Amino acid sequence: MAPAILVISLLFGASILFGLAQSFGLMTGTEQETISFEAYRNVFSGQGPAGREFWSSLGFSLWVATASTLLSAIGALTIAIWLSNNKGKSQQTDTLALNWNLAFPHLVWAIALLLFFSQSGLLARFTASLGLIQTPADFPILVKDRSGIGIILDYVTKEIPFLTLIVLAVLRSQAENLDIVAENLGASRWQRLWYITIPQVLPSLMAGSLIIFGFVFSAYEVPAILGVRYPRMLPVLALDFFLNPDLNSRAEGMVISFVITLIVMIVAIISLRGEKEGTQE
Amino acid sequence: MKNLTIVIFRIFLYGILIAPMVLFMLYAFSERWFFPAPLPTSWTTNIVTRMLNDPRTTSGLFISIGIAMLVSFLSLLIGFPAARTLGLRTFRGRQIAWLIFFLPTVVPPLAVGMGLNILFLRLGWSGTLFGVILAHLVPTLPYTIFTLSGVFSRYDENYEHQALVLGSSRLRIFFTVTLRLVFPGLIVAALFAFLISWSQYLLTLLIGGGKILTLPMLLFSAVSGGNPTSIAALSLLFVAPPVIIIAASARFLVQHGNTIREQY
Amino acid sequence: MTKIELVELKKTYPGSHQPVLNHLSLEIHSGELVALLGPSGSGKSTILKLITGLESPDEGQILFDGKSILPVAPNKRGAILMFQKAYLFPFLNVEENIGFGLKVQGANPETIRAEVKKMLNLIGLPGVKKRKPSQLSGGEQQRIALARALILQPKSMLLDEPLSSLDTEVRVNLQEAIRRIQQELGITTILVTHDLNEAMGMSDRTALLINGQVAAIDQPMKLFTKPPTQSSARFVGVSTFFKGNLANGVLTTDFGKLSVNTNGHHAESALFAIRPEHIRVQTEPEINTLQGVVTDCMYRGEYIEYQVEIQSLTVRARVPMPAPVIPHGENIYVYFPPEKLFEVSQQ
C-alpha cells in the first residue's frame, strides 16, 4: 500500500501545489517573489485578452460538454434498451463490438473524423460523385466549425458505446426478471419501459454521463484537432496561455486550468453521490 | 421487420468499427486522389515505406512502446499490493487511501501536467524519459489499482489458505495460486495502463518539453502539417498496437469490460 | 496418530471487546473424531484456524503429541483444513489438485500419479482425474478436496462444515465416507458443524462450545440424553426445565410436585430437565402428571408435537406416531417419567 500512496500523493500533491504557486505568479520564471492575484483578476475581469476569451471559452466548453453528454445519454439509452430486447446468440458479439471502440484512442478517432467529414474528406467526395455538390466549398463545415459540431460528433460517437455498455450491464444483470414480474402484473410494453427499465438504469446512466461531462470538459486532444481558432474550449485556451513565450501569461493558463479542475471536481462529486444511491437500492 | 432493423443496425455498428481502419488505409496508400474522386485513382506504398524508414518515426515508435511498457509494468508492481489491501481489507484510513487514488482520475491531466512541468524543470527531470514515465504513472497507477481492487473484492483468500495448509510456501502460493486466480484482471489492468500511456499527449508534451518525441507528439505535428496522406500513415502505425491489444484481449474484455471507465 | 491438546487458548479479534475463545481447553485423543458443535460466533472455526496457523492465539498452547506447534509455520504443521467450499484450484484439473500437496513437497511425478490413483479409489471417484473442478458436482468437489488433504497423510484433519452446502442425500453419503476413511487411516480429526445430527452421527465425542468455552464434552449419546448444563441442554433440543426445592427424591416446583431419581441429595434450588420425546400426554391424572391446556398440535411426520400450557409454563412433547390429534383448548395431563428427568447445572 505504502509505495502506491507515496508515489501518487507526492506526484499529484506536488503538481497541485506547484500549480497553485504558479497561479499566484510565483515560480513562473519571472522575477516576482510575492503572491499576486493579478492572474485571477485578468482571467475573471472579462477585460483584456485573457478575460475576454475566458468567458466565451467557458460558454463554449459548457455547450460542447452538455450537448455531447445529453446526446450520448439519449443514444446509449435507446440502443441499450433496444439491444436488450433483442436477445440471442449475438449478445456477446454486441458487447465485443461495443468494446471495440476502446481500440481507437480519442486522438486517432478525431483524426478519422477529420479525414472523413472535412470539406475535402471522404464524405464530401461521395456527395460530389453523387452530383449533390460541385466543389469542396459546397460541402457544409462539419469539422473545424465555429459551433463545435465536429467536437460534439467525435465525443458522441465515441461515448455512446461506452455508455451503452454501462446501461446494458445493468439491464442484463437485473432488469429482466423485474420486467417479467411487471408484465405478469399487467403493465404494457411502454409502461414497463417507463416505470421499470428506465428507473433501474438511471443511476448508472447518470453516473456515466457525468463522467463523460467531466472528461469532455477537460480533454485537450479532440478540440485541439477538431476545433477552430475562436471560440476555443477551455483546455486549449489554458495550454495556449501556459506555453506562451510571454512568461506572465503562464499564471493565467494555470488559473484557467484550476477553473476546469474545479468544475470537473464538482461534477465528480455529484456523480459519486448518484452512484452511491444507485448501489443502495 | 424488427429483425431487419436490428440486422441493419448491426451492419451499421460493425461498419463504424472498421471504418477508421479503411479510411486510414485509403489515404495512406493513395498516390493521386483529386476531388471529387470517391476512391484514389492511383495507389502507392511509398508514403508508408518512407514513413517506416524515417528515423524520427521509428525512434518515436520505440520510445512510445518502451515508455508504455515500463509505465504499465511499474503500475502493476506498485499498484498490486495496494489493490489487494484496498480490495480485501477494511482498515482505518481506507477512505482516505481511496480518495488519494481517486483524485488523480478526476483532476485533468492538463492541471497535473502544468503543475509537474515547473517542478520537474527544477529537478532536472524535464525532457527526460524518467520524468515522462513518472508523469504517466499519475493517470495509470490509480486506474490499475481500481481495476485490480475490483478483482480482489471478488477474490476468496481461502484458496491461499488451502494451499498454505497443504504445505505450500508463501512465495510459491503467490506465483502458483494468487497470480493465476487474478490473471485475467491483471492482463486487463496491464493492457489498459499500456494504452493510457501509449495515447498520452499532454503529459508527454508538458514534461518531455519537445525532447521526448512519442508517436502522439509526431501525430499532432503531422495534423498541424495538414497532409492527409502522412497523417493517415502515422495514424495507422499509432492505432495498430491498440487494435491488436483489444482484439487479443477480447475474451477478457467481455468479462471485465464493465470496469473500464478510464478515457484515453 | 497424533494427540492434540488445546491448553487455555485465548483469542480476541482486533476491534472486538469480546474474546472468541476464552481460556478454552480441549484434548483430542489419537485417532479420535471430535465434533465441535455450537451456535455461530462460539469460536468453532477460530479453533481450526489456530491449529492450522492461519491465526495465532493471544494466550495458550497447542500441542501435538505433547510438543508445541505454535513455532511451526502453517505450511509445515501437517494439520489440513477443509472448508465449506471445496476450494479446488479452478485452473488445475482433478489430478493436479489432488497432487498439489505432494508437488510442493517436491515428490517425483511417478509417485504423485500413483498416490493420486490410490486416493481416487479411496474416495470412490476413479476416472475423473482429467476433469476440471467446474465439471464436478458439489459433492464430488468435496470428495476431491478430501483426497487432496488425505494424500499428505496428515497428522490431523480439520473439517470446517465441509458438508453444509450439500443436498441431504449427498451429505449423508459423504458423512459415511469421511467417517469410514477417517477410521481406516486413524487420522485425528476435528469436525466443526452446527448440525446436531451430523455431530451425533459422525463423532466419537462431541464438544459443545458456548461463549468461547467448552460447555460440555462427551459421547454423543450421553451428551444428547444427559447434557450437564442448562445452556448445553437447550442446544441439544431440550426446552422443558423445572426449578424447585429438592428433598427426598421430590422436586417441589411452582407447578406442583414431581418425583425424580436422585442419589438422595438435597438442594434449596435444583434444576431438572427432560427431553421432549420423553414427555407423554394422557387424559387421566397419575403420579408425576401436571394438568395443562393444549395450545397447539402439529403433525411432524414421524411424531406429533403437542404444545401444552401448564399455568405459565409452556411444554413441548413429542409423541411418536401413531398418536391422537388433540383439539386446541382441551384439558389434558402431561406425564414426566421420573427416570427421564435429569438434573442440570444452572449455566
Image (tube, coloured by chain):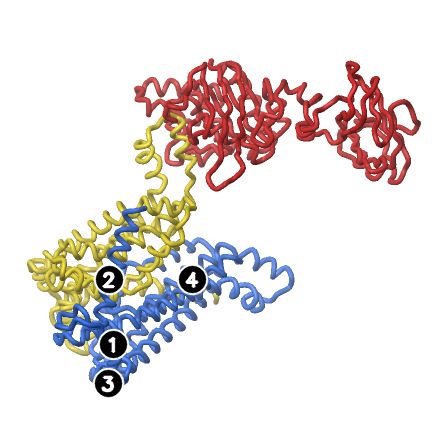
**Tag count:** 4
User: Residue flagged by tag 4: what amino acid is it?
Assistant: Leu
Across and down, in percent, residue B176 comes to: 32, 34
Q: Are marks 1 and 3 on the same chain?
A: yes
* Colour seen for chain B: yellow
Name the image quarter holding residue A164: bottom left
C102 sits to left or right of A231: right
* Left or right of residue A269, residue A125 in this image: left
Across and down, in percent, residue B8 comes to: 39, 66
What x and y, as percent, mark residue A243? 16, 72
Mark 1–mark 4 distance (CA, rounded to whole Å): 33 Å
Residue denoted by label 2:
A15
Query: Badge 3: few (under 14), some or many (20 or more) residues near its Cα, within 10 Å?
Result: few
Find disc 1 in the rendering and name its residue.
A37
Mark 4 sits on what residue? A272
What amino acid does circle 1 point to? Phe
Q: Chain of mark 3?
A: A
Q: Is label 1 in contact with label 2 (beta carbons under 8 Å)?
A: no
Which of the marked residues, 1 or 2, is nearer the chain's N terminus? Answer: 2
Q: Are marks 4 and 2 on the same chain?
A: yes
Tell me which label, 1 or 4, sits earlier in the chain: 1
Q: Which mark is residue A138?
A: 3
Chain A is shown in which shade? Answer: blue
The nearer-to-camera label among 3 and 4 is 4
Task: Give residue A137's position: percent from left, percent from top.
Answer: 21, 84
**Which of disc 3 and disc 1 is earlier in sequence?**
1
The amino acid type found where label 2 is placed reads: Ser
Quadrant holding the C terminus of chain B: bottom left
Marks 2 and 3 sit apart, C-alpha to C-alpha, by 48 Å
Comparing marks 1 and 4, which lies closer to the viewer? Answer: 1
